[in-house]
Amino acid sequence: MSLHLEKLVGNLGVVWGMDFIDDQRLIFTERDGWLGVLDLNGNKVSWLQGLPEVHAQGQGGLLDVAVPPDFRKNSWLYFTYSKPGLLQAQTALARAKLGEDSVTDWQDLLVGDSASLRNIHFGSRIAFDGKGHVFFSIGDRGLRSPAQDLSNHIGTIIRLNMDGSVPEDNPFVGNSQARDEIWSYGHRNPQGLFYDSVSGKLWEIEHGPRGGDEINLIEKGKNYGWPIVSQGQEYFADIDVGVKHKNGMQEPAKVYIPSIAPSDLLLYRGGEFKAWQGSLLTGALKLRHLNRVELDEKLQAVKETRYLQNIQQRIRSLAVDASGKIYIGTDAGDIYRLTGKHEK
């Protein structure tokens, strides 16, 4: 099998998030605050109104968009974005209903306690478990140590009910020293999050410092170490950040050294690339490729393969259609479709 890459549309902004509304419509965000729908019948883009102001500075802006399993019942779409404050921005989860040419009934479900004067490490991806819950990620905002402090939302994976309320079985409910919304903590900058409905597992990928990007299997209430544990080094010198391992802190399923600067994550279950079944796919920003990781029966990484280096683009977002074709959004403002050519 060989790969065939087709450019569908270009000249967009940073295509930060993508998801399918239906078989023919792909909704996507531009980080600078625009929301578009790509009609695959003719590859035409239409723009939706009704968005709030976003903090489109540095790594902030309009981030992920996700179509929930019950979308056809109620037309809700879910978003993460950098919500502007007086001097600082915070990562927020919101939802709105899809109309003909706009989104309506915008609701901020949670404005994360994650303010920072630094315009970096907002996260933020969304995942649904199909059981009435939504997960989303918040980065460490460049502050590091608050990722170990459960009294804020910095450096966490959040779990909420679909209406934004807190599930009673969240791990820190009733703990006066912790935020009820937190599912896991000790994360640096998670820009990929995927719930695999087949296995019931939640996967995450995050940026490490100079080396040390991690793929993690996320478990309820667990500490993933940052910045006490890290596989990377400081940017100013060859000095390790923290220690490599520590009792009570989770080990990653895979570490990338050097860093690929990952963005978005999915576990492939489609039919287009049968050999890729059960593999994790992520985009690479720094090393500019599509990254595939094969897992063993213990869900540990056993092989890594890199594709599409020839296009030399920062791959920011991924989506898969019902037939298993893969859609790729880039920082250069292009959306591609990846298919397989099967030899007879």
Image (tube, helix red, strand yellow):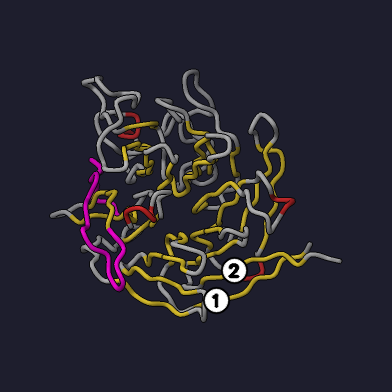
309 relative to 187, above or below? below
Which residue is located at x 49 percent, y 41 percent? 195
Q: Which amino acid does label 1 sit on?
A: Leu
59 or 40, nearer to the observer: 40
User: Mark 2 or mark 1, which is nearer the start of the sequence?
Assistant: 1
* Circle 2: element type: strand
Please report the bounds of the magenta region as a residue range: 97-119
23 or 251, nearer to the observer: 23
Q: Where is residue 249 in the image (x, y as percent from the top left)?
A: 47, 24
Q: In which quarter of the image is residue 303?
A: top right
Q: Position of residue 145 (x, y in %)?
A: 33, 33
The reply to whether residue 79 is visible in this rendering is no
Q: Quadrant of the C terminus?
A: bottom right
Which residue is the extreme one toward the front? Answer: 73
Numbered label attached to residue 8: 1
Q: Quadrant of residue 149?
A: top left
Mark 2 and mark 1 in contact (Cβ < 8 Å)? yes
* Circle 1: element type: strand
Question: Dot 2 corresponds to which residue?
Answer: 337
| Membership of 45 in magenta stretch | no
Whether residue 132 sits left or right of residue 24 in the image: it is left
Separation of residues labelled 1 and 2 (CA atoms):
7 Å
